Image (tube, rainbow, N blue to C red):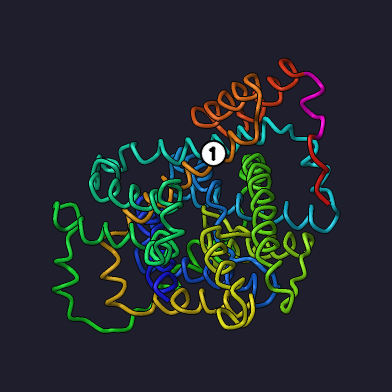
Amino acid sequence: MVQGLVVAGATGLAVAPLYHEHFGMGFETAVALVVVQTLAIISAFMFFGDPFCPGWLTPALPLVLREAIALETTAERIDFVNAVVLMVGAVFLLFGATGLGARFLRAVPKVVKAGIILGAGMSAVYGEFLPRTGGRPSRMDAYTVSILAATAVTMLLLFSEPVARWKETRPWLRLLAGLGIAPGFFLAMAVGPWVGEVSYAAFRAYSGPVLFWPDFSGLFTEFAVIGRGLPEPEMFVRALPLALAAYVIGFGDIITGRALIEEAAADRPDDPIAFSEKRTHLQLGIRNASVALFGGPFFPLQGPLWTGATVVVAERWRQGKDGMQSLFSGITSYYFLGLPFLYFVRPAMEFLRPVLDVAFSLTLLLTGFACAYVALAMVDRRTERGIALLVGMTILGFSTLTGLAVGFGLAFCLLGWKAWRPTEPPPV
């Protein structure tokens, strides 16, 4: 309940300030887009029966956002991100329906995949230090103490090896770590006002209505594809490299999610789970396309997995029926205790609004850390590590298309045809 009501809700709202800053959306319109994408996320298990806790395609977020804000006008940014979301949906639908996904993944060398993920992580971290529009300081400069405190506590609880050993003998610490990013987020909410980085004056002074109604009308007419029309063809051409990079990232999430659930399933033979990569591909295609059609430029994209939530639910599920009746009942409870309803309560909106920038920074910094260790674990030779770094730097400094071109060129010139030699059985 704590994670669903506060953490998931605040994480979803974290993108609202960026829509105002880069896409010209009012807060009510941005919240409407968050509601639409939330309904699409819930559909993954409610209507399609995918056995994962779904979420964003977070590593692709900094790549899409960086190329979008490089465009001059707000209209161009909206159309470009709409094109990216539609292209991602089309790629998943095509690869899922035809089975081309396996062939495509074989055609991309492992070192290029690592470079894509590393570039996403580098973009996520680097963006937190860049000035924002209107001459405003970067989020790291504006919320230095709050962001560092939240990130430090979260990384200690989630990634620290000494803390992991302490969890074995301290149930309270294991429970605290099981809350994911909630402890760090709560700490930022407490530290922020104390150091003068966050102010709750507007929340304390608020005396308006309790109900909050997002601006769905403005969203549909001005930002969604059904209202503003399809982007120009050149936007789709420009979006294709990002869509292919997003597919590489998304397929990695599918493999991760299946591994997490299969590991826990060994303790729950009473609740058999059916996996289907084709179903996962098709629901991701439908979810992304529907968000673009009815919501608009959702640059975090729809992904197959929220890793933190999946770990929390899977660990509880493996305890047996006394801990969780079934995997799907656990996933449903996690999401329904907050995500769909929080956005219609005005006091909750006003309470979370001052710390949304901190929540977004925390999300991206953790994404950068996770992308780094995943990418570097994919390569085990020094030449491959060097190529992955150069691909990541090229993506950071230029574009995803340029990074892909550099990656393929370096893989062929420095590794030869063995760069395409599979090191593990190809995906089904």
Q: Estimate the x, y position of residue 204 in percent, counting from the top left.
A: 15, 73
Q: SS class of the residue under badge 1?
A: helix
Name the residue rendered at 46%, 37% in the picture: 70
Q: Residue furthest right?
A: 98
Query: What residue does disc 1 label?
Result: 373
Q: Amino acid at mark 1?
A: Tyr
**Quarter of image, res 293:** bottom right
Q: Is residue 260 left or right of residue 277?
A: left
Q: Estimate the x, y position of residue 427 in percent, counting from the top left.
A: 80, 48
- For the record, the magenta segment spans 416-422
In front: 162, or 255? 162
In front: 411, or 425? 425
Quarter of the N terminus within the rendering: bottom left
Image position of 288 with respect to 208: above or below: above
Name the residue rendered at 73%, 15% in the picture: 413
Instruction: Please say whether residue 373 is visible from this viewpoint.
Output: yes
Q: Estimate the x, y position of residue 374 in percent, counting from the top left.
A: 58, 41
Name the residue rendered at 67%, 31% in the picture: 112
Q: Is residue 211 left or right of residue 143?
A: right
**Quarter of image, res 191:** bottom left
Q: Is residue 159 left or right of residue 419?
A: left
